[in-house]
Structure formats: structure tokens, C-alpha cells
Image (spheres, rainbow, N blue to C red):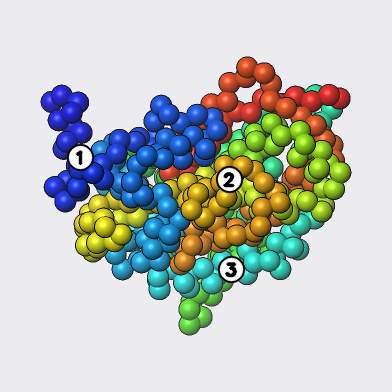
Amino acid sequence: MNAQAQIDRTIPDHVPPHLVYNFDIYADERVSSDVQRSYAEAIADAPDIFWSPANGGHWLVKRFDAIAAVASDPEHFSVREMQIPRVENPPFFIPLSLDPPDNLKYRRAMAPMFGPTAIKALEPRLRHWAQTIVAEVAPKGGCDFMADVAKVYPVSIFMELMGMDLSRLQEFRHLAERFFEVQNDAEEMGRLSATILGIMKELVDVKRARPDDKLMSHFVHAEIEDGRTMNDDEILAMSFVLFLGGMDTVTNVTGFAFQQLAQMPELQARLAADPAGLSTAFADEAVRAFGVVNSPRLVVKDKDLLGVPFRTGDMVLNLLPVASRDDRKFENPHALDIDRKKVAHMTFSTGPHLCIGHVLGRAEIRVLVEEWVRQVPRFHIVEGAERPFRTGTVMALEKLPIEWDV
């Protein structure tokens, strides 16, 4: 079978030809290390909702309002499967793989540990880790920001929050990275899932035997309905998604944000002159501009929406980072502008699956940029250095070599 015939096989009869646009979420050559901008530019000429024949064929939704319509309609667009291409026995996450109202009791169990009050109480530990990690690299005059800072700082916070063994940081970090690298390899993804679940089960057993004030202990003992606590399967499905998010998501947003900041000496100077005063605005704008999660849905009931015929069994990918740069919503959307009027974005999704960790993520970035500019007020990307990256359902910058005067 020739290449064109293979492509034609992944375009169902219900997909109109004018809505077909070739784009590979895992390996499109038009995407560069400036991932969010180049991604949006690569599909600028595509319809607002389009069908890509790559990876088994699926819909992609790029506009803010269209994604809001999909994300708020679980009757037709379900989270029960979130792998592209579809795989047998897909990973099951709580509450991520549950449609409302089934997800609500689990979100209520998680909320006290991730709300504003809890995160404010956690801030001294955020600052401790930020100061410690930045102090290790500041005298060196340069580092790989990803390996030395972005892949260590939020992961240390998450592991401490969960009550995990910090000596295993690099091991756990590697597992999370590999999981997102092999989204189109069902066998390897299954193996990694089993490994991660095994690690989480060990932690559950420890916290059942020796409760403490950490997050995993909270899950073990929290009541979710009528006095019932969660069983091991529920706890593992919940901790699985937290493991992946805690190990990877804030790391990636931070990396992309600092890649841009490294190219903006005037903004560095402003931040260094007033770290506490400007760090919140920086964190908010960084989160808007450098989202990394693209959110899949499975069509479970036929739906004609915005002129598009979604049919049962279709996979849909909501391009949240692209929607947060929608030029119909944001003026000069590709600019990192800390003076931008604060407006709603789509980085953390919306509706019943708004990211539970959004308060913590913002706080981590805010504290890190404060401590960074206090110790490293001016820095830039090493000239000619390679900056490899990952795309797919969760995007990442793999390396960011930077340098500064000591």
C-alpha cells in the first residue's frame, strides 16, 4: 500500500475533504524549539477544527471558544480514553478519566490539599527549594536550565508533598519523561504504567502502616462519600495522574518560559529590580503563553458542532496551548507581556476538568522567578546550543543551555 492510500484509510467517510489538514502531533517538521509559537503557526491555515490523517486519524481543535464547547460537553466528548492513537486497555486516571458527575467526589477529596490556603502554607517549602537549587548553579556561570533547575525544582516539591523518597528523584523523573515520549507505543506505555503503579503501591502501603501529614497519607485516609475511604485501585489511579503531572507539567511550562525570558534582557532587568512586585504577573503570563498539555477526548455520541460532524469513536485533541494564543482572544498573542491585562486562558483547560494543580503551578513559577533573578539577574541562551524538544499530548523542552556573568 502506497503512502497516499495509507493516509486515505485514516480519513473516514463522514469527514469532509475541506476539513482535512496534514499535521503530526508527534513529529511535524514545522515545529521548532519555540514550540508554542511554531505549533500555532504550522496550523495557522488549517480550519478551526480539522482532521489529521496522522496517528490513526483524529480531530484537532485549535480555537478558544471551540475547545470550551467540547470541554464542557461530556455527554458527547468523554475523557474515558485519552490516547492518540487509540490503544487497547488505555491508562485509567482518577479523576482525569472520569466524566462528571463521577469525577466530582475525587476532586473534592483532592481540593483541600491544592487550594489557595494549602498552597500559601506550602510557600516556605517552595522558597526553600528555589533558593537551594538556584544557589547550586548561580556561582557556575552557566547550566542546562532543564536538567539543573526545571527538572529538579517542581519535582522536589511534588515528591516532598507526596512523602516520596527524594533520593529517587532522577529515577522517577525519567519514568515520567519516558511515559510521554512513547504515547504511540502501547506496549512500552503499558510497561511504564505498571512500573509507576508499582512505585505508587509501595508508597500506599507505607502510608497505611505509618500515616503522616503528606498527600499520599491524605488520600489513604480521606473519606469520599458516606464515610467510605478509597480502595487501593482508586488511590493508585489518582496518584498515577499526580505523579505524571508533578514530574512533568510545571517542569515543562517553566522551561519554555525561561527560554523566552533568556531572550528578553529588558524584562530580566525589570524583574530583578522588583522581583516580588512583578513575579505574579510573570507567572500568570508564562502560564498563558507556555501551556504544554493538549487534552484528548473520545466522541461517545454523534454531534454536529460548529459545522463539524463528530462521530462516535472519533478521537479529538483540544490544543490548549494554541487556544491560549488565539488571536481572536489575545492581542499580540505570541508576546510574553507581563503588562497584559489578565484574561482567562485555556492552559489549565476549563469546565469539569480544570487542572486541580493550577494554584500550585502558578505559585511554583512565581517563587522560582523571584529567587532566580535575585541570584542570576542577567542570563542568555548559549549561542548555537541545541534545544531539543518533545511534542505530542504533553510538550517539553529537553535542554536549555544558558550562561551568565559571575
Q: Nearer the viewer, mark 2 or mark 3?
A: 2
Any mark on residue 340, and which? none
Q: What is the x, y in percent for residue 371? A: 80, 44
Decide: few, some or many residues near mark 2? Use Cα within 10 Å; few <14, some 14-19, many ≥20: few
Is residue 324 in view? yes
Kind of element beneath mark 1: loop
Of marks 1 and 2, which one's residue comes earlier in the chain?
1
Kind of element beneath mark 3: helix
Location of the N terminus by quadrant is: top left
Q: Which residue is drawn at 26% across and 41% down?
A: 20
Q: Do the residues labelled 1 and 2 touch (CB within 8 Å)?
A: no
Is residue 242 in view? no
Q: What is the x, y in percent for residue 59? A: 30, 48
Q: What is the x, y in percent for residue 84? A: 33, 44
What's the CA distance linking mark 1 and mark 2?
36 Å
Residue type, mark 2 in image: Asn
- Circle 3 residue: 111
Q: Residue at x 39, y 30 (%)?
A: 28
Of marks 3 and 1, which one's residue comes earlier in the chain?
1
Q: Nearer the viewer, mark 3 or mark 1?
A: 1
- Circle 2 residue: 332
Location of the C terminus by quadrant is: top right
Q: Which residue is drawn at 17% across and 36% down?
A: 8
Residue type, mark 3 in image: Ala
Asked whether, in this view, residue 223 is left or right of residue 210, the answer is left
Q: Are marks 3 and 1 in contact (CB under 8 Å)?
A: no
- Circle 1 residue: 10
